[in-house]
Amino acid sequence: MNSPVRTTGSDVVHASIEATDGFCRKVFAAIGADEATADAATRAMMHGSRLGVDSHGVRLLAHYVKVMEAGRVNRRPNVRIAQSFGAVASLDADHGHGALGAYRGMDHAVALAEQFGVGAVSIRNGSHFGPAGAYAMAAAEHGYIGLAVCNSDSFVRLHDGAMRFHGTNPIAFAVPVENDQPWLLDMATSAIPYNRVQLYRSLGVQLPQGVASDEAGRDVRDPEQVEMLAPVGGEFGFKGAGLAGVAEILSAVISGMGLSFDLLPMNGPDLSTPRSLGAFVLALKPGAFVDRPVFEAGMKRYVEVLRSSPAREGTTVMAPGDREWKVAEERRRTGLPLDPATRQAFAELAEKHGLTPPFDR
């Protein structure tokens, strides 16, 4: 699970949620992105930053600007349904921002689920879409169960492997809970996402044991020495590698897009050629399977018993998402923590486009 990074101390400055949201939108507008792209990209990044998934939050703004200006990502795409068959559809994202394709895909999946009980949308010609949980949540916020997966360029070794094979290939699953926050699982199938390595480099923090490797597949903790990531599961990493394969097949194979080891790297050097990423979203209408009150009672009892179950000494049992909702509430009060690299990137973007960075207000 994408657990929040501890971002406290003198190396972090806090900015208000509203100011940061507005700054991101103004930057996208300044480089010529259309309103739909600015909205989707900002919405997804803010989901990550608000819930403590900082590796997939607003620290990505500078990267997104760079790839849009270089030509990799279409700033004004024509996103459309390319083909459909009953409760299934394929969406062409026209090489636009991955968040726009994912949100549009989930919107269509929800509409299909309303009609058929289930809606599945394969997304082609996309790009990096950030936090997968944002799109699963888009379904849960409307009362549907949501699933979102994607693949990405190779950076994760197989269990006992010594080469980059899968991407971090996230899986997100969100379920609405009556009068409560959704049950939300948002996990990379790697032990950590690569953006977490970049964040730790910026903060000067050592990595946990067993999450990353050097070029020979040997474990390292220094983020500067990381050449590949380990699959989730530690000694049982074959499980993480298998889950990565599930995301790979749903994202790339059935969309006709590139497999992880065939994709251009996220960070270049070629930032002008579209990466043609695939993704997949699914929406389920609970009331199509069982009476809605029965579903709601089942989910309520499930999370209540889960949270009240005995915990090991010194620990607390949480439902998936509980940690994120706690962080979101804290950041609603204190603002978003911006690490040094993100502040520097914001300052440069502000100077270039005549804007005020959110931490200078």
Image (cartoon, rainbow, N blue to C red):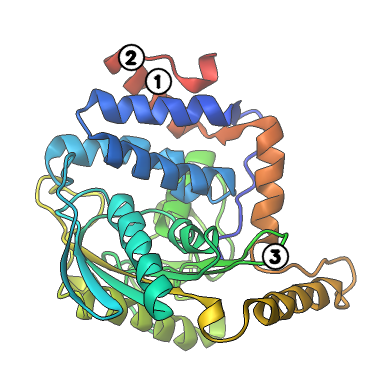
User: Badges 1 and 2: C-beta atoms under 8 Å apart?
Assistant: yes
Judging by the rendered image, the residue that carries numbered circle 3 is: 178
Residue at the spot x=54%, y=28% of the render? 18
In the rendering, which numbered label is found on residue 351? 2
Residue at the spot x=14%, y=38% of the render? 70
Q: Amino acid at mark 1?
A: Ala
Say if residue 225 shows up in the picture.
yes
Q: Position of residue 133 (x, y in %)?
A: 49, 60
C-alpha separation, residue under disc 3 versus residue under disc 2: 46 Å
Q: Residues within 10 Å of mark 2 (few under 14, many from 20)?
A: few
Q: Looking at the figure, which quarter contains the C terminus?
A: top right
Given this view, does label 3 or label 2 mark the residue nearer the observer? Answer: 3
C-alpha separation, residue under disc 1 versus residue under disc 2: 6 Å
Q: Looking at the figure, which quarter contains the N terminus?
A: bottom right
**SS class of the residue under badge 1?**
helix
**SS class of the residue under badge 2?**
helix
- Ranked by sequence position, the earlier of labels 1 and 3 is 3
Judging by the rendered image, the residue that carries numbered circle 1 is: 347
Up the image or down, 101 lies above or below 339; here it is: below
Q: Position of residue 10 (x, y in %)?
A: 65, 28
Left or right of 151, for residue 190? right
